[in-house]
Amino acid sequence: MVIRTGLARKPWTNYKTSNHIIAYLDILGAKDMICNDNNFDFLNHLNMFMEDAIEESGGGIFPKEEEIYIKIFSDNILLAIELKENDEQKDNKIATLFNTVANIYNEILRYGYLIRGAIVEGEFFHNDIIVYGKSLVEAVQLEENVAKYPRILVKTEVNTPNNLYYLMKDNDGEVFLNVFHLCNIFDDVAFKINLLELLKKHKNNEKIKEKIMWMINYFNSWFTKYEYRIMNQQKITDEEIQEALL
């Protein structure tokens, strides 16, 4: 029994935040799907996605003391890695988080769902009960108010080689994670089919359609970009878009 003593009672803990790289992800449209999931189909798909997220996070990339922290609440995923002072592994840790987020995004896109989110470096704390910190607040605000499209905004400094490989700059100047850099062979075919199906499904909803069209433009910009794909380039054509909108 806890004896309530008002202001006379003081915390016994002395917790402090420390520098982390964190990712906050939100599955778009999941709230409506949860509220209308009468046959629990989405619940079980969601469980499968989250199991995949945990698998991606615990794949033995780091020693145990440096594993990625993961917290899942409904349709939100939070990932975090501590960055120590003068951390010699900082670039590798950031790259690992980028890779994990890209893998999670691609896994979910294979089933026809989109993600929006943000990756932020800053102060963060977690234990078995609480997640807390300025970086988490910033990431949530970025996801809700700035990301707008199904993209993962990135707000951390990355060295030049990783920057060129992992990141892309959007038309509004925002930097976002290039999730397609880690997709598997033939994923582009599945992604194309799913994006056209999403466009067809939401063709009468201008707000959702705008998000899907952003994703289609991103898809086309990446999968038609490099010479090594010249024999098997995937593109969502204007004709295919118009057919989906009929």
Image (cartoon, grey):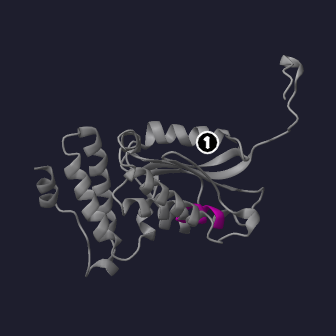
Q: Could you say where residue 202 lies in the image, as x and y percent from the top left? A: 23, 45
In the figure, is residue 69 to the left or right of 242?
Answer: right
Q: Could you say where residue 176 lies in the image, as x and y percent from the top left? A: 46, 54
Q: Which residues are magenta?
A: 92-99
Question: Is residue 127 shown above or below 158?
Answer: above
**Amino acid type at image mark 1:** Leu
| Image quadrant occupied by the N terminus | top right
Q: Characterize the local packing of mark 1: few (<14), some (14-19) or many (20 or more) Cα atoms within 10 angstroms.
A: many
Question: Is residue 212 shown above or below 58?
Answer: above
> Which residue is identified by label 1?
136
Q: Using the rendered view, name the quadrant where residue 67 is placed.
A: bottom right
The residue drawn where x is 15% and y is 60% is 240
Is residue 159 in view from this perspective? no
Question: Is residue 134 shown above or below 72?
Answer: above
Is residue 243 in view from this perspective? yes
Q: Nearer the viewer, residue 216 or 132?
A: 132
In this rendering, the count of numbered labels is 1
The residue drawn where x is 25% and y is 45% is 209
Q: Could you say where residue 180 lies in the image, as x and y percent from the top left? A: 41, 65
| Secondary structure, magenta segment, majority class | helix
In the figure, is residue 184 to the left or right of 73?
Answer: left
Q: Using the rendered view, name the quadrant where residue 195 is placed.
A: bottom left
In the figure, is residue 70 to the left or right of 103?
Answer: right
The residue drawn where x is 65% and y is 60% is 68
Q: Could you say where residue 143 lies in the image, as x and y percent from the top left? A: 48, 42
Please tell me whether residue 42 belongs to the stretch shown in magenta: no
Q: Secondary structure at mark 1?
A: helix
The residue drawn where x is 26% and y is 74% is 233
